Image (spheres, rainbow, N blue to C red):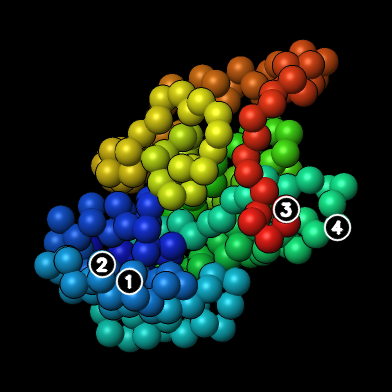
């Protein structure tokens, strides 16, 4: 019997690449995203059993309903990947950015919790399963003009760490994934250099390897782990001086300008 994989943010970018990766291995998929047309188009291109669910991960009831339907049809997933996320540049001084802060934090943090929650008890009962959260190397330090996104990913890393410890000995493994620069519609807007840029397909393959190794935390590509560690140990005076000179920053939400 093939694996069962439930995946959020599946309609494009990393999510779409992950769906194709697991479909190529014969997995039964549960795909959740906000754009139903893109989900249906993706499903039509996959030769594996696929259930699609149109919902926003901020809608806890909607995610719970999708999770329940998938488990009723196919059983408890072997892998759940909370991938849905958004990112825009934000500046605290602008009142119009407050709503963007809220949207990013709700999506990238509470969306993670909403995705994990329906599956945790069933996985505990079966004493197996992997709960995978997509965080980011942006969660290691705060970057100028990127406060909401960095804060949300830092929170994601710590939430997943807490959940990992809570699940120790239960048979449920919690995996924190910190992508570096991945070529997706989200990063296509970035006006700055993106070292070690990976395609979404290459990222999906490397994540598959990490899950097979049963890693608990992984940075993809690995070179970005060196960058992240360097930023973490850099004294604040040096970090602040270097980053404050950065001119190119993540674009703000179109509605904020």
Q: At which x and y percent is residue 3?
A: 22, 63
Q: Quadrant of residue 154?
A: top right
Q: What residue is disc 3 on?
A: 257
Q: What residue is disc 1 on?
A: 39
**Residue at x 17% of width, y 66% of height:** 45
Q: Nearer the viewer, mark 1 or mark 3?
A: 3
> CA separation, marks 1 and 3?
30 Å
Q: What residue is disc 4 on?
A: 95
Label 1 SS: helix
> CA separation, marks 1 and 2?
5 Å
Label 3 SS: loop
> CA separation, marks 4 and 3?
11 Å
Left or right: 82, with 13 as reference point: right
- Image position of 88 with respect to 70: above or below: above
Q: Are marks 1 and 2 in contact (CB under 8 Å)?
A: yes
Left or right: 141, with 202 as reference point: right
> CA separation, marks 4 and 1?
34 Å
Q: At which x and y percent is residue 213?
A: 31, 39
């Amino acid at each position: 019997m093939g694996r069962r994989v439930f995946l959020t943010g599946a309609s494009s970018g990393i999510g779409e690449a992950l769906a194709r990766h697991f479909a190529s291995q014969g997995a039964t998929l549960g795909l959740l995203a906000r754009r139903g047309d893109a989900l249906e188009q993706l499903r039509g291109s996959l030769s594996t059993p696929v259930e699609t669910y149109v919902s926003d991960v901020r809608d806890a009831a909607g995610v719970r309903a999708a999770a329940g339907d998938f488990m009723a049809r196919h059983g408890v997933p072997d892998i759940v990947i909370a991938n849905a996320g958004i990112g825009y540049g934000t500046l605290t001084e602008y009142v119009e950015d407050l709503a963007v802060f809220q949207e990013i934090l709700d999506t990238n943090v509470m969306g993670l919790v909403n995705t994990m929650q329906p599956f945790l008890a069933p996985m505990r009962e079966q004493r197996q399963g992997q709960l995978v959260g997509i965080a980011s190397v942006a969660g290691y330090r705060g970057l100028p003009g990127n406060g909401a996104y960095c804060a949300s990913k830092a929170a994601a890393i710590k939430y997943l760490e807490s959940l990992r410890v809570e699940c120790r000995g239960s048979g449920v493994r919690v995996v924190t994934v910190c992508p570096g620069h991945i070529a997706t519609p989200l990063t296509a807007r970035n006006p700055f250099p993106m070292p070690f840029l990976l395609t979404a397909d290459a990222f999906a393959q490397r994540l598959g390897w990490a899950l097979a190794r049963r890693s608990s935390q992984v940075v993809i590509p690995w070179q970005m782990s060196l960058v992240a560690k360097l930023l973490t140990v850099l004294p604040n005076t040096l970090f602040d001086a270097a980053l404050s000179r950065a001119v190119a920053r993540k674009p703000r939400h179109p509605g904020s300008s």
